[in-house]
Image (cartoon, rainbow, N blue to C red):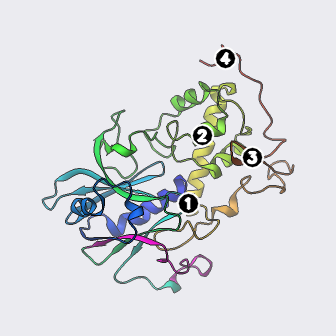
Amino acid sequence: MPELPEVEVVRRGLEPGTVGRVVDEVEVVDPRIIRRQSGGADRLAAALVGSRLTAVVRRGKFLWWRLADPDGQDTGEALMGHLGMSGQLRVRTPDPAPTALLPPSEGPAPDPLRHRRASLHLDDGTVIDMVDQRIFGGLWTSPLQPTADGAVAGLGSPDKLLPDDAAGIARDLLDPAADLPAIARTLRSRRAPVKSLLLAQDVVSGIGNIYADEALWAARTRYDTPGNALTQRRALSILREAGAVMERALGAGGTSFDALYVNVDGRSGYFARSLAAYGKDGEPCPRCGTLIRRDVHQARSSFYCPRCQRPLPRARKDQVR
């Protein structure tokens, strides 16, 4: 499933070719991809056709385009795009760059439109395709509301408005408005395993299984450590390491294990080559040489070093402040 770095790579890829363009046509190939749209395909077309895409914004794993009417006035709605487990937002331009310019090992995925579910046709001939093999992602419109904390809504946002459907999503670690000490205190106030807390999108958004394991390895913390067993210093270390590993992944184009995650032009990310723990069961820990272990906890695989990431003492009731 695409996590924050992969979705941010997609957002950055969408920006130059879609922002400022007007939607001429909405093509729904498979209605399941717009199942969250109130009023169905007709309502989606009514909201989009003739509207200008004025910004593409991300918070956590959620993307949205801001919309303006033909007079340039904000419509009060956003077009949400969620990739789910296997969704892709692909951009086709009227004059595509020759594939020979792409690195041979990172070229476009084969048959890119095999699972096309919807397309937005823009006024300059550009087409945005929603491709989704498993159809867990989707496109739909959502009304805007002010942010609860009064800060800019997310990366790429022009103001402090965000969609209703993103209002319950916490800020992510690449967001300048994220309050790391407050997030750390939230982690420490709960008894749940720290990895589960990192995956809870209402605590901190955008982190999935891959980067949670990598952050916990970097911070020498075992995945099942209760949140209330963490010191503030360790909780902050985990968050900073999570932000750092996602920044590095972003610089590498994200993490691709198969063709389900690609950028808007079909290229895969290559951060998988730099992973220290995730997916490394039976391989030596890059730090100490102990073999990485895989445990299944709460129906998820967790990869960790049994030497570097030892259990912490349980917290006393008066320990968390």
* Label 2 CA crowd tier, 10 Å (few <14, some 14–19, many 20+): many
Give amino acid for label 3: Val
Q: In what element is the residue under mark 2?
A: helix
Task: Name the residue located 57 percent from the left edge and 47 percent from the top edge.
Answer: 207
How far apart are the alpha carbons under marks 3 and 4? 29 Å
* Label 1 CA crowd tier, 10 Å (few <14, some 14–19, many 20+): some
**Residue linked to disc 3:** 296
**Residue linked to disc 4:** 319
Query: Foreground mark, 3 or 4?
Result: 3
Tell me the magenta residue range: 101-122
**Residue linked to disc 1:** 251
How far apart are the alpha carbons under marks 2 and 1? 22 Å
Give amino acid for label 2: Leu
Determine if the magenta segment contains residue 90. no
**Residue linked to disc 2:** 198
Q: Quadrant of residue 177?
A: top left
Query: Foreground mark, 3 or 1?
Result: 3
Give amino acid for label 4: Gln
